[in-house]
Image (cartoon, rainbow, N blue to C red):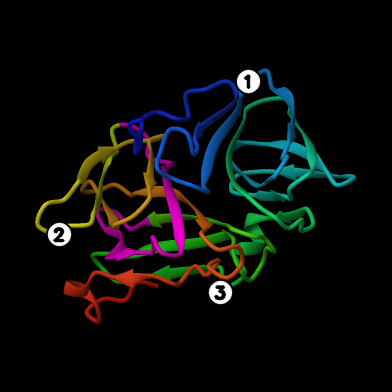
Amino acid sequence: MSHAWLFRGTHRVQGRKRIIHQYNTGLEFLRYGRIVFGEKGGQIEVDSLDEEIGFVCLRGSGTIEAGGKRYSLGKYDALYLPRESRCAISSNGTFDLAEVAAPSSKRFPVQFVRFEEILKDPDLAKEAGFQPYARKLHTLIGEKNVQASRLLAGVTFSKDGNWTSWPPHDHSKEKEEIYLYIDMPSPNFSIHLNYTDYRDMEMVVPVWEGDAVAIKKGYHYNVASPGTSTGFLWMMAAIREEKDRVFTQVTVQPEFDGRFKLF
């Protein structure tokens, strides 16, 4: 079976759909899906089975009932659902959730992350890099604020026309990753690069709102079109549970190591 790495327009769904998984990519652990309710709202139940799941609100608002509590989510709020758990998701209007998942052998508590609290924490919300690779980095599900086996997730927004995730870096020995491009209204676009050979790059592609890229291995980064910002939800799954769940554990491309500040 051939593996896909680029998934176009993943936001164009209704209801719940698992989009990237172990059967259509080379990713072993990391999965991504979408739950989208339109203007009339909707409701759905999700059973996590053997996975831990992170829900991140990308548009609209709604509620998630889990662990005997009811949580209200707005833009960039997140909820962690442990394995062997069930939740009820509902809204009276537009509600767009990214669903990031990975298998887990441990069962942690349900945990709710409010974006406004992330913005108050300098360890979770920070300015990274410098012009022309300056960006705002927000960790929603990280080692510091959420107990989990494998999952890490957050949102990054570049300065207009800047590169992000620079310098080129790789973490394939420790973590798989997916970039989901968000908040890039037409005609805005960015260029996504991913490669193992600096002189023969395997992936150099334009990406638009809703496109997702699965990153199994290789150096990766992106650049915004002039006058526009790149926005993306980054999602990671540790290869070894807990031990590899370290956001800053990366290998910088040797040609650029020591010349730029990644975080």
Along the line of sight, which residue is nearer the eye, 31 or 212?
31
Label 2 Cα crowd, 10 Å radius (few <14 / some 14-19 / many 20+): few
Q: Which residue is mark 2?
A: 198
Q: Which residue is mark 1?
A: 39
Question: Of all residues shown, which one is farthest toward the left?
Answer: 199
- Cα separation, mark 1 vs mark 3, equals 35 Å
Is 10 on the left-hand or right-hand side of 99? left
* Residue 185 among those drawn in magenta: yes
Q: Secondary structure at mark 1?
A: loop
Query: Depth-wise, is mark 3 or mark 2 nearer the camera?
Result: 2
Residue 7, quarter of the rendered image? top left
Q: Which residue is mark 3?
A: 122
Residue 118 x %, y %: 61, 63
Label 3 Cα crowd, 10 Å radius (few <14 / some 14-19 / many 20+): few
Is 160 on the left-hand or right-hand side of 250? left
Q: Amino acid at mark 3?
A: Pro
